[in-house]
Image (cartoon, rainbow, N blue to C red):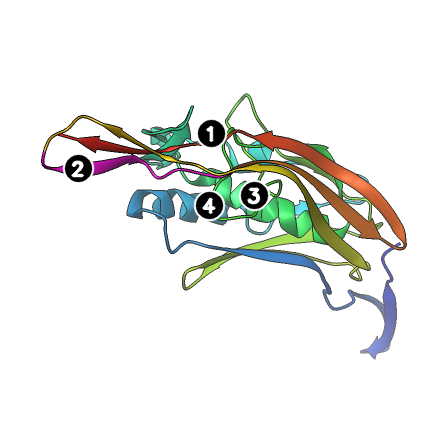
Amino acid sequence: MKTIFIAFAAIMGTLTLVGLEPANQLTGAFSTSLEARTASQRHNVEIAVRRLNGAVIKPGETFSFNGRVGTYSRDQGYRRAPVSYNGTLISSWGGGVCQVSTTLYNAALLAGLDVVERSRHRYAPGYVAPGRDAAVAYNNLDLKLRNTTGSHLQIKASIEGSQLRVALTGAAPPKVRVYTDFGSISRPFVVTNGSGPSSRVRNQGKVGCDVRVFREMNGRVELISQDSYPVMHRVIQRS
């Protein structure tokens, strides 16, 4: 339960009851790098960050990322930006928003929140370790988190230089360790299409792997997720 400190003050002969909120405590925080993101992706991240920042999750409440941030459409100010679709980068409205949901997801894991809904990307993204991503796609994929801390939590999202940071404040931090267990790992190889003098990279290539993520909290270990990412081979186009 949130602790309420009571102060009494005599003002003009009247006894006044004043409720004093305790100072916010950092419950959990996580950062990811924006250095490799395009200008359009960063623009979309900035919009999502502004909408996410300041959200309050009541004790026992389930928070919906899509419900808070809304649609990632042109009329909401988003731009077309690269997203991965079946291993190929395409331009789509709101590209980059998944980095915001992923950063929130990791902060929530460290804060001890329950994960109600979370989806992985088809291929592991480069801004976070495999198994630690949280894909969103309005209206199909959402990130939902339940506040089990017993206190009101506030989400503080910001961009500090090249770092995207999400923090949850309001409750004492739990004793948490999040760790990853890798199974099989598949390394990409290079595929060359065409035989012309000039070349360009169509796909950068990504490692494929089986991965399990665990959380140890207050002496108890729980399996958070179990994911399998296919390998994406590096494709060079010659023309």
Q: Amino acid at mark 3?
A: Thr
Q: Is disc 3 in contact with disc 2, using a CB cutoff of under 8 Å?
A: no
The residue closer to the viewer here, 56 or 209, is 209
Q: CA distance from mark 1 to mark 2?
A: 37 Å
Q: CA distance from mark 4 to mark 1?
A: 24 Å
Q: What range of the chain is rendered magenta?
A: 197-207
Give the number of the disc on residue 71: 1
Residue at point 70%, 33% (across, down) = 226
Q: Residues within 10 Å of mark 4 (few under 14, many from 20)?
A: few
Q: Amino acid at mark 2?
A: Ser
Residue to which mark 3 is pinned: 102
Residue to which mark 4 is pinned: 126
Residue 22 in magenta? no
- The disc, 1 or 3, on the residue closer to the chain's N-terminal end is 1
- The disc, 3 or 4, on the residue closer to the chain's N-terminal end is 3
Give the number of the disc on residue 191: none
- The disc, 1 or 2, on the residue closer to the chain's N-terminal end is 1
Q: Is residue 42 above or below residue 146?
A: below
